[in-house]
Structure formats: C-alpha cells, structure tokens
Image (cartoon, rainbow, N blue to C red):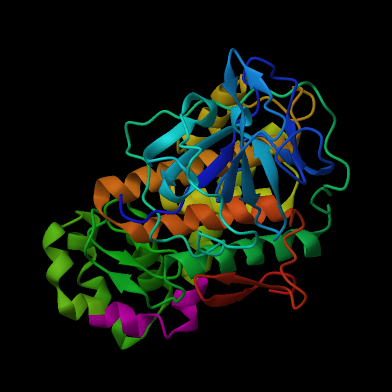
Amino acid sequence: MSNAPLTAIIRGIPESPAITEINIRAGASTNYAVLFKAPVRLANLGVLDARRDETGSHHQGKVYQWLRLAFPDGREGWARDDLLEIYGDGTRCGYGLIAVPTFAFALTRDESVSPLAAGQHIVAPVGQREEMPSPAPVITPAPPPVPAPAPAAPGVPALAATPAAADRVQKAAFNITSAFEGGGYATYQNYDSGIISYGRFQFTLAAGSFITVVKLFTERSTSPVAEQLRAYLPRISARDETLRGDMNLKALLVQAAQEKIMQDVQDEVAVEGFYKPVVELSIAPRNIQTPLAYALIFDMAIQHGRFNHLLPKTEETLGLPSKSRLVENGVSEPVFIQTLARLRQENLYALAVKLNLPGMRPRGDFWVNLVAAGDWMLEGDANGNLNINGKIVQVRNP
C-alpha cells in the first residue's frame, strides 16, 4: 500500500441493530453540537484529521479518538472511533498502514502526531479514487446491522406507474450502463474470458448473448455485411475461441453497428434478455420501487449476469428471507439499496485486485456515491446529467 488515503466506513454498533444512523458532530467530543446524521455502512469517507476525545471520555480505560470525515455531498464533521472502520495510510493521523477495513477503536493511535491544520485535506476528492488500493478478496468486513422495522423513508419516491416514466427509467439505465461498458454499438474487445465482447452492452460470445445478437441481425438484414456474417454463424454458435483473433470478423461487426437494424437488435436483446427478466424476477418480487434501484440492478445484471449473487447476499447480510418484499419485511428500500451498492463495490474492489484490473473500481464507487447523494429519481444534476468517468450521460430526458 503506497500513499493510499485513509478512508472510513460508518460501522455503527453491530450489537445494537436498531441504530441505523450515527451523529456527526462539530468537534472531538459529545459536548459539540450534532451537525447531521450519517447512515450505517456509508463508505468511502475521506479522513481529514484525528484527535483524542477532548473530555478524556473512555471505555475500559481506553480514551476515544475522533476522526474528521469528508462526506460525498461536501459536508465535513467528526465521528468517534468506536463507530467506524478505517483503512489506508493513516500515518499522518497517528495510525500506521491499515491494509483492510478495521474497527478503529481496536487500533492504537500515536497521539503525539500533530493534528492536521483545519481544512488541510489528505484525500483525493470523492470520485477520484481509482488509485485507492482494494481490500483483498479474502476479506470479510464486519456485516452491517439489521435495521429495525421501518416504513419506506420519507422523500424517497416510487417509480411512476406510467409508460412514459417507465420508458424514461429504462433509457436512463441503458445510458448509464452503456457508458461503463464502452458506450457505442460498435465497441469491440477480445482480451478477456468473454472471447469476444461486442456492442453497447458488451455482449459476450462465451455467455451466448453475442450469439443471439448476430443471429437476429443476420435474420433481419439483407446487407452485404449481414451476408458475410452468416458464414460465421456455425463457428459463432460453437463459441469457437479462435474467433478471438479473427480481424475480418471484427471489421464486419464494426461495419454492422452502423446499421439501424443492428442497433435495434442490441437494444432488443438488452431489454428482452436482461431488463425485463431482471424487473420480473428480481425487482418486482422484492417491491423495489425507485428509478435509481432499477438502474443499479440492471447494471449489475449486465456486468455480473442476470442471476448474480449480490441480491441474495444483500438479503443474507440484512437477515431477510429470499425475495421478501421491502417495507413489509421491516427494511426500507434506502437501507437495502445502500447495502447492495456497498456489497457490489466490495466485490468489484476484490475483483480489481484478483484480475489486476483497477479500472473496475470506479463503477462500484459511482453507485455508492449516487446512493449517498440520494438521487432516487435518477434526475442527475441541474441539466439532468451524470458524469461517468468523464462521460456526460443524460438521465432526466434520455
């Protein structure tokens, strides 16, 4: 770990699962005013400073430490170390190098280290964390507490039940995922286990979605490109790995992407093969309502497969029955989706280490930050845009 910024996760009190938020205060003791509350399991919080409890408050003889945290919305405030997990380079705050998320109160801080001057930041701005080291795949961070039964959080709107609204959410979800997957109908790569990944959503030969795309295109198009692609169908259907190096096939696919038929086919396969099944089999049974949640779960289906482990893992983490309906099962949608986004982020960080692909991390960070920002209606900034790794994506009027 080299110069990795010290980062915090709101741990809460696992033995008190009814506590789902902690107080963020104006200074390093409980005598200071509460500035705001932060939800348990909120992650990627930059640590700006650390100080001994100003009143000497302690537990079993160990004096509490307070950490000044930077939140995704730009606010800052102090939280006590018995409510946090931290990891990264803590040298400047009196901690050493912390390789994995660790209960902060269990660590011993060198109090002789001078606190940082007020306003001096030691972390990169939120959203610029690609260089942040990931926890190793074997790590099992402390599970989040099971929240007490609660109604859906006020101010979190449901997906509007009109065709126009539903179409808007689908298009917005497609725009977001397309930006992560490469962005264009002609996007092509052949360097991973997918053998060939092609198109707006990187349909893969190995998984079979690429086969469906090419078959539908050759059935509907009468162009010379379609005719030449038909000759490849036997090898494509057999998932012939030697196609990885076939540059003629690549050229044909790039040409085919210029045709409206190919573009329509790619969107159709995404809808029929991913979006609709995900809504019918994963989203609706759980009573998930918000546009943000729809987009997140679709993005997961494209990257990890329609029936990936992350939704069941979220239910297991929160102690919920499989496919139980949110609110009715005692857990609100914000708590569920926040946990889901965090688990997906941890999974991507672990994969980034395992596969030596650090570019996987920002995708997890994006969704955690979007949830933290509370953009449940998926409306973006003042212009209706989201910034995805420098790509400006329209979501309000896609």
Q: Residue at x 75, y 53 (%)?
A: 376
Q: Residue at x 30, y 84 (%)?
A: 225
Rendered position, 190 above or below 206: below
Front position in the image: 328 or 249: 328
Task: Inspect the magenta stretch and tell me whether residue 69 lies in it.
Answer: no
Rendered position, 354 above or below 197: above
Q: Is residue 221 left or right of residue 366?
A: left
Residue 89 in the image: x percent, y percent?
Answer: 40, 48
For this orientation, the residue located farthest to the front is 112
Q: Which residues are magenta?
A: 251-264
| Quarter containing the C terminus | bottom right
Q: Residue at x 55, y 64 (%)?
A: 125
Residue 336 in the image: x percent, y percent?
Answer: 66, 35
Quadrant of residue 98 within the rendered picture:
top left
**Residue 274 in sight in this render:** yes
For this orientation, the residue located farthest to the right is 154
Q: Is residue 272 left or right of residue 243?
A: right
Task: Inspect the magenta stretch and tell me whether residue 261 lies in it.
Answer: yes
Front position in the image: 392 or 190: 392
